[in-house]
Amino acid sequence: MTALSKPSGKSSVRKTLPTPKAKPQPYEWLRDAILVNEIQPGAPLIESSLATWFKVSRTPIREALTRLEQDGLLTRDKGRLVVRERTPDEILDIYENRAVLEASVARFAAERRTSQDIRLLQRSVDRWSTVDTKNQNEMLEVNRDFHMAMWRAGHNESLVDLLSRLDLHLAHFPGTTLASDGRWEQAGKEHAALLRAIELRDANAASEIAREHFLHARDIRLRLWDTVRKP
């Protein structure tokens, strides 16, 4: 086993190299490490160092870094690629764009949903009360399952693609708004109300509930950001 230590930067990265059987693909491994903040904002990703650590040529590393830059997870700083650090304005933009798209897909879901779509949404709503709220990963998984079920119920692949990209950006933020006091219970009620509107084919109600749901999350995220950034 060996480990990788990144060169200088705001943060360093250290990760045990998997055995050959478990060797990951550079893009997937780096993306996941960034999303869970094992590689923190501001950390440089050096092509040559990564190629050595992954024991591959520079080509797949270059391709991985290009994809991560296209995903918006990396940015260029003085000629080198570093993990992107979001500003409050960018956070606001991402949540507001997501609110608009969620409202649109909820409207489509109310208009186009099938009985199978309703069953999948109901299953996600039913799981809500069984979640261990001390386990943020489980909370995120169940929440994402509901939203993905709603996206699919809208039967609009272009919207699903756009929402998936924005979801990737939101996953980059540390922690989860769902862990804030009372938010898990409130979000569960909002999901249940959204399901009812979709089931009743009330497109206007579904759209408004979905929009407000994400604006609530936006407000909590901004408060969390302020707390983290206070000296």
Image (spheres, rainbow, N blue to C red):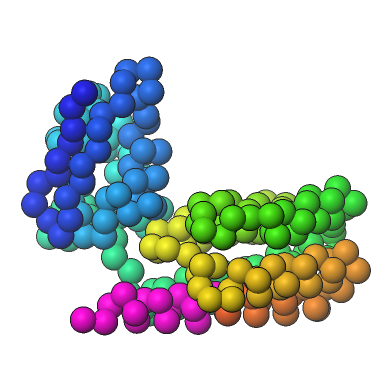
Q: Residue at x 25, y 38 (%)?
A: 15
Residue 229: in magenta span:
yes
Q: Residue furthest left?
A: 8
**Quadrant where the C terminus lies?**
bottom left
Q: Residue 107 appears at what percent x and percent y?
A: 77, 69
Q: Nearer the viewer, residue 220 or 87?
A: 220
Q: Which secondary structure class fits the magenta region best?
A: helix
**Quadrant where the N terminus lies?**
top left
Quadrant of res 61: top left
Q: Nearer the viewer, residue 56 or 22?
A: 22
Residue 108 sits above or below residue 32 on the image: below
Residue 190 sits above or below residue 140 on the image: below
Residue 168 sits above or below residue 190 on the image: above
Quadrant of res 201: bottom right
Q: Residue at x 40, y 38 (%)?
A: 28
Q: Nearer the viewer, residue 59 or 128?
A: 128
Residue 104 appears anywhere in the view: no
Q: Residue 65 appears at what percent x and percent y?
A: 29, 44
Q: Residue 44 appears at what percent x and percent y?
A: 18, 51
Residue 161: in magenta span:
no
Q: Residue at x 42, y 81 (%)?
A: 223
Quadrant of res 24: top left
Magenta part of the chain: 217-231
Residue 152 appears anywhere in the view: yes
